Structures are given as structure tokens and as C-alpha cells.
Amino acid sequence: MIDFPLAKFFTAKALAFTLAACVTGGAAAAAAAVLSSSGPAPQGPSSNTGQPAPAATGTGTGTRTGTSGARPGATTPSAPVSPAGAPVTSPASQSLDATSLCRSLAVKVASAAGDVTSGANTTAGGALSQAGLEQALASPAVAQALYSPTFESLIRTVDNVAAIPDYCALLLRLPTLPQPADLAQVPVSFLTGALTVLPSGTLAQVLTALPTGTLTQVLGELKPSALSQIMITLPAGSASAILTRLPASALGTVLTTLPSSALNTVLTTLPASVLGTVLTTLPSSALNTVLTTLPAGSASQILGELPSSILSGIQSEIPTSILSQLPLG
């Protein structure tokens, strides 16, 4: 049975601490005192949107769960530690840019696993190596590490906890992404800015992992120069996979946006079967624009590689000047 006078005493004590916090500004100290006198602290923070914050999912490799928009709660943070063992200059997320926050996050995870203190996956200077950064960001412990208020601005930027490791991998220019499929949750504005600086392997990994809708949006928002750089950087197999996934209108937009030299490079590297699929998918107006944009002689060379069955299907859309150069029966 509950001793009601004692319960009232604790209730009054909690109210007194709350009022003290409002008057003196010591909200954190008052809350801590109330919690310590009335029971154990809650297990993990909650989102200010009313949804629970992410939690570590156990020991499964690469498995992470999170709530979109979730933010760390008011748990007391442990100061992030640099690879050399010194505290980061300021724990406030506002004082660090996103790249620094991502590196601090990886260091925190690696330190908890003993990879920093043991010297594993570190450089001669004591910093995390590329392999160490990749291993840390792929760890399920990332979700727990994000509880620190240090990373609140990082969570606000990405707006999805599960996508933060991939976001950080892109910022840190890592060749391998922990969960490429999670990039669908990264802001498109960030992706369009990051794609042009990625090596071809990572670029192909990113674009082929995006859902068709996100891929269409990302390619559609790129400036012509950036789109040109990306399409000629992609390996032929990745370019084929990406172009054949696009709906007709988006495919037309991409190909008609490319300047003449880039368009020629992309189309001449496609296998004949993929080239036939791409050209027959294009709307008539876009096909005509593509063929007339190509350098002189390239259009007839490209079309000459197509099987006669495909060529006859698009014959009506081929400009007369190009059609006269083709070996049509």
C-alpha cells in the first residue's frame, strides 16, 4: 500500500524543484534532482515531435533503426573525444560544421568499441583511418551515439537518423557507404551538391541505390555542367542501368540537357541493346533533339549500330539529313 502522506511529500518536492528551475534558470539541475529522488531516469530520449528517438538495434552488423526527424533528448552528453584523446573544443553542435560532426560521431563510436585506444584502424598520427571511419559509421552503435545533444544539428539537417551514416560517408568522401538504400532519406539538395565530387565507384553506388523517383528528382535538379560531369564519369554499366530506369519524360530531360560532346560520350559507350531501349523510350521530340545535337557524323554512326527492327521503329522520327546516311533497305 502507498503511504499517501509520503507520496504527497515527493509530489511537493518535485513541484518545488520545478518552480526553482523557472526562477533561477537551473532547469537541468532541478530536473536531475527530482529524477534522482523519485526513481530511475527514463531509458533514452524522445523526439520533440512526440515520437520516440532512435535506439541501437543490437549486435546485427549494419542494422539501424530510427524515426524520421527524431532528435536527441536532454540526456547529459559525454564530451566527444578526438582520436588523440583530447576533448573536442566545444560540445555545442552549432560550433562544428557537418563534416566535423560526422568525424566526431565516428570517433565516438570507435572509442566506445576500443578501436581508438587500442590503435586499431588509426593512422600514425592517431586519427581514424579511412577503414576506421567506414567501420564506425557502419556500426549499429551509431544510433546510441547520436543521443548526445552534440549531434542535434546533424539530425536536423538530415531529418532521418537511419540516413546519417551514409550522409557522413559522403561528407567524408568514403568509397563505401554503410547503407546506400538509406540515401533516399537524405535531402535532395545535399545529394545534388555532393555527387560532382564523388569518385566514380561511389557515384555509381549512390545513383543506382536511389529509388527511381528520387533518382529522377536528383538528375532533374542538376545544372547542365554538373549533369554532364556525372554522366561521363559513370562507368558504362552504371550509366546503362540508370538511363533504362528513368521514365520517358525524365530520360528526355536528361539527354536533351547534355551538351553535344557529353551526349556523344554517353551514347557511344552504351551497348547496342541498351542504346536501342533508350532511343525507343524517348518521346519523339526528345529523340529528334538528341539526334540533331550530336556532332556531325555521330548520329548516323550510333544509329547504324542498331538492329534493323529497332531502326525501322524510330525511322519516322529520324531527321532526313541523318536518315539519308543510314543503310536502310
Image (cartoon, helix red, strand yellow):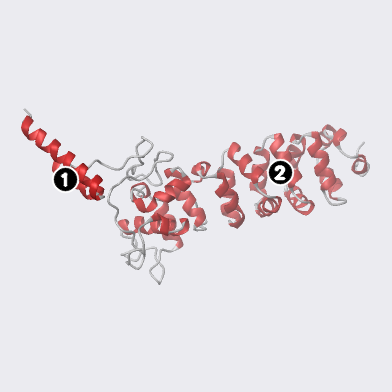
Labels 2 and 1: the sequence-earlier one: 1
Please state, as top left, top right, bottom left or bottom right, where the N terminus lies in the image: top left
Query: Is 304 positioned to the left or the right of 5 in the image?
Result: right
Badge 2 marks a residue whose secondary structure is helix
The spot of residue 15 in percent (x, y) is: 18, 39
Q: Amino acid at mark 1?
A: Ser
Pick the front one: 306 or 164: 164
Please state, as top left, top right, bottom left or bottom right, where the C terminus lies in the image: top right
Pick the front one: 53 or 62: 53
Is residue 247 visible in the rendered image? The answer is yes
Q: Amino acid at mark 2?
A: Val
Residue found at x 43% / y 59%: 96
Quadrant hosting residue 90? bottom left
The spot of residue 322 in percent (x, y) is: 90, 43
Which mark, residue 191? Answer: none
Q: Residue furthest front?
A: 23
Q: Residue furthest bottom?
A: 124
Q: Which residue is mark 1?
A: 36
Q: Residues within 10 Å of mark 2 (few under 14, many from 20)?
A: many
Residue found at x 64% / y 43%: 242
Pick the front one: 303 or 122: 122
Residue found at x 61% / y 41%: 215
Q: Which residue is mark 2?
A: 254
Badge 1 marks a residue whose secondary structure is helix
Query: Is 304 positioned to the left or the right of 235 in the image?
Result: right
